Structure formats: structure tokens, C-alpha cells
Image: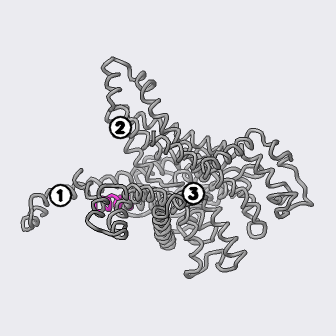
Amino acid sequence: MEVVSLLVIAFLAVAALAPFLLAPGDPLAIDPLDSFQPPSPAHVFGTDESGRDIFTRIVHGTGASLTIGLAATAIGLGLALVFGLLAGFGPRWLDFGTTRLLEVLFAFPGLLFALLFIVVYGPGVVTSTIAVGLSTAPGYARIIRSRVIQVRTSPFLEASVVLGRSARFRIARHVLPNVAGSLFVLATLGVGQSIVWASSLSYLGLGAVPPAAEWGAMLSAGRTYISSFWWMTFFPGLFIVLSAAATTLLGRAIQQRGRES
Amino acid sequence: MAGSLSVDLVGAPARSGARGRLIRWALLRAGGVLFVLWAVATVTFFALQLIPGDPAEAILGGPGSQASAEALAAARAEYGLDAPLPVQYLAYLGRLATGDLGTSYALRDDVASVILDVLGPTLLLAGLSLLVASLIALGLAMWSTRGGRVAAAVGSLLEIVAAAVPHFWLAISLILLFSTTLGWLPPVSVPGGLGLVLPVLTLAIPLAGFLGQVMREALLDALDSPFVLAARARGEGDGGVFWRHALRHAAIPAIGLVGWAFGSLVSGAVVVETIFARQGLGRSLLSAVQGRDVPLVIGIVLVVALAYMLVTTLTDLADRVVDPRLKARS
């Protein structure tokens, strides 16, 4: 199963880095005579309203779609790391304040915070990516905080204090390397979730906009034609499911291995 | 009061201690809920001040409306937007305290009554979905913990894929299969039970994937634990061990996920209600976001936050009931 997920991830990586290897065509090439073609040997996934080949567009959209997922995860984890370090390593009042702040942020469940953010800053790729990152940060922060506290109260950190090391040294040398493992697992598990959320926002018309060959944008473009031309939304969605499931499987496998060793 | 009552009970000292702890816990919890609600209201109020453009223009139908200066001034006065910001904020908190959520810009109607109208359908949808998701998760977990290695691998894969499926894509696929191809179920929500099937399945399947992953691990953990061995030694059969001991153990992490499940249901409701053209809180939220209908957005955010706090409080209470170890600890 891990092998399958690695194969999917390898395919996605090639599609993102060298799309022309997998789909030599032009993702923006319009052919009005060939519009709304169902899947066939010439167009494996069919064509859209302008006769653009959907397989080519999916392959060429991989880079943008994965970038959105990775960027959102990076924003969420970055913020969470700051919060987690402040709460877990700072003085007690800072821990108290940060924990209360996280509790407040938890009361904006799911995509609620993202929607609020989009009301303020308007729809678009950048805002929806930041919005997804912000929505995921509290969940990560709670996990990182408990991990930081676990490290802070460990005997080797006590030894470091006794040796007179500065707080900065202790964070850089002891806390960060010990938190890095959990960060990596959280990241692999989180990328899938971020891709799903960002694409949901795009589907609702609040994220990436057509004609970009990005999966979410393709989905929101296909929405109008959903009842007659299902392949326009089915295949981009299938790739979202594939990439989310593959990264989650990989994350679980890494987690399992970490637990066994 | 609590002390005088417990005098008549057997084992009074221990009981009054437990009751005192529970009351203390409830008071702290209520304070926490009020604090979070105040903070959510404040964050939302000030965040929405950052919206570029004139709110009076939004009231009169957006920047394209070419409203006259008099009309804008009238709208400002009507919604109290001409007062200084601190005054507006205090007036807003005062109105909230009396349960007044303001007037929707787009619907020209009381926000509280708009929300009350759409709350019922969403609660029904979310409640049914949670029930169906728990049943699916339980079924999968039972089947894959008892069925050997292959069943475990297949069950685990099913759960991961189910959890990775975006709601909108699942909805589209279910419509294609059951409405367009088979013609069994209506593609949009119609009154009655039949129209609920696809929306409930759409919300339940990803949730079941998440719950299943957690429950299966806890079940495996429980079936390996000393208390199950002890139960078997007392001569309990497979069924008794499973239903009476292991399942209760597996419920603990699942209960811990309730806060998360709530978020998934709220986000899912936005998508599902939009796709199936179903009246509800999620769809109202989306149209309020798209139309930048600030009072309605704030109102829905507050209601969701309140519901979230209630759900997590009940969860903590349930935790204390299911897991006797927690009572001793606090």
C-alpha cells in the first residue's frame, strides 16, 4: 500500500516538475470544434467547453495545486510552531495567553475562519491559501505545544539549563530537532487536508479562478456543466482524492515506523 | 445546598467532594464559554472593520449601486455606522447581550430570525450524518478488527480514502451514480426523507473515514489490554468482551474527535447545502460571505461558536462518564 502511495506521489512530482513529459500538449490550446468531448482514446479524460484536453490540463495544473496545498500547510505549521514555542517555552502568563487564544480560534471550527478571512480580503488564490493555512494552525499548535512541553521537562534539557546554556541555544539545539519529527508527520498528514479545503473554496468560487489550469479552478469552471458533462469535474476531483489519500497514507506509514522504533 | 443534601447519602464525605468538584468544573466551564463567545464576537467585529470600502454602500447593494450621498448618509444613520468605532463596538456588545443580532444587509430581515429559520434543517442534516457516520465507522472497525490481516488492510485503506474525499466531489459522484445513471434518488433536495439520503451520505462518508481510523486503533488497543484478558478469564464470550469492554474503550478517542467532527460537519454543510440546493445555515453563510453581508456573517459565526462550545462541554461531561479514570484525576 505504501508502494502504491509512493508511486502516486512520484507521478504527481513528475507532473509538477516536468509536465511536458506526461502530457506534451498545450493546456491552454483551444479547439472549439472539439468542445465537450466525452473521454475517448484521443482525449482520455475528455475535453472542456473550449475543447481543451482535460488530462493535459490536470497534469499541467498539478504544480499550482500542490503548491497551494504545500504553502497552506507551511503557513499553518509555521504559525503553529511560533505559537507552540511561545506557549511551551515562554513564561507561564504567555502559555496561559496563548492557550486561551487557541481556545478562541478553535471556536471557529473547520472552514469558518477561512470564510471570515475571505469576507475581509476577498476571494482569490493567495487569500484562499492563507485562509486555509490560518484555519489549520490552531490544531497543529496544540500538538506542537504539548510536544515542546514534553521536551522542556525532559532530563537532558534540565542538564542543558544546569550547564548554563541560553534559551536560544536550547531551542535551536534541543527543542527544534525533537519537534521536527512530529512536524514532518503533521505536514504529510496535513497536505492532503489543505488540498481538499483549498479545492473546496475554489469550488465555491472563493479560490483560484479560471482559466488557470489549477484543479480547483477547473472544478469551479466545470460546475456550470455538471449535469451534462460530468468528466469536467469528475477527473480533477479524482486527482484531489488521489493526492490527498496518497500523502495521508505516507504520513501514517511514517508515523507507524516512528512508533515502532 | 450541595452539602446539606449529601449528608443523608451513604458515603457522604466522598460524595460531597465529588459534587463540589463537579460544581467548580461547571462554573469554570461556563466562565470559559462566556469568555470565548466575547472573544469571538470581538475578533469578528474588528476583523470585519478591515473590509475595504464603505459599509453603507454594501447595504445599498454594493459599489456598483451609484447611491446618492443622501441615501448613503441615511443608511449610515439607520445602521448606526456614523458613531465612533468604540461606541459602535459597545453598542454592538450591548445588543448581543440582549440576543439582538442586528439586521441583515441583503435580506433586510432580523438576523436572529433568519438564523432560526435555517437552523432546523441544518441540525437535522448534521445529526443524521453524525449518526450514519458513527454506524459506518463502527461497522468498518468491527469488521476489520475481527476479519484478519486482509480485512484490516482493506478497512484501513477504505477509511483513508473516505477521509480524503472532498465533500463537493463526493456529492457530484453520488448524484452521477444515483440520480443521473440509476435514477433512484433526486439530484436536488426535495421535501421528505428521499431528498435527505444523498446529502446525509455526502456528509457522513468522510466523517466515517476519520472516526473509523481512530476507533479501529482504539479497538485493537483494547482487545490487547489486561482488562479484556481478565474478562475472558472470567469466562466472557467474544460478544460480551466486544460490546461491554472493548467498545467502551474505543469510544473515548472517538468522543475526543467530536470537536473536530463538528468542524467537518459545518464546513461540509456549506458545500452540501449549496450543491443540493438545500435550505440551511451553511448555504446562508456562503451567500452572506459572497454578498459581504456583515451582520449575517457575524450572527452565523456566533451561533456556530456557541454550538461548538456547547458540544465540546457536553463532550467533556461524556468523557467523565465513560472514563472513570478522569474523575479521579481532576
Q: Residue at x 25, y 58 (%)?
A: B324
Q: Residue at x 54, y 55 (%)?
A: B76
Q: CA distance from mark 2 to mark 1?
A: 29 Å
Q: Is residue A28 left or right of residue A33?
A: left
**Relative depth, front residue between A232 and B82:** A232
Q: Amino acid at mark 3?
A: Leu
Q: Residues within 10 Å of mark 1 (few under 14, many from 20)?
A: some
The percent coordinates of residue A23 (x first, y second) are 82, 47
Q: Amino acid at mark 2?
A: Asp
Q: Nearer the viewer, mark 2 or mark 3?
A: 3
What main secondary structure does the magenta stretch of the protein show? helix
Q: CA distance from mark 1 to mark 3?
A: 44 Å
Tell me, yes or no, if residue B78 can be seen here: no
Q: Residue at x 73, y 60 (%)?
A: A233
Q: Which residue is mark 3?
A: B157
Q: Which residue is mark 1?
A: B18
Q: Which residue is mark 2?
A: A95
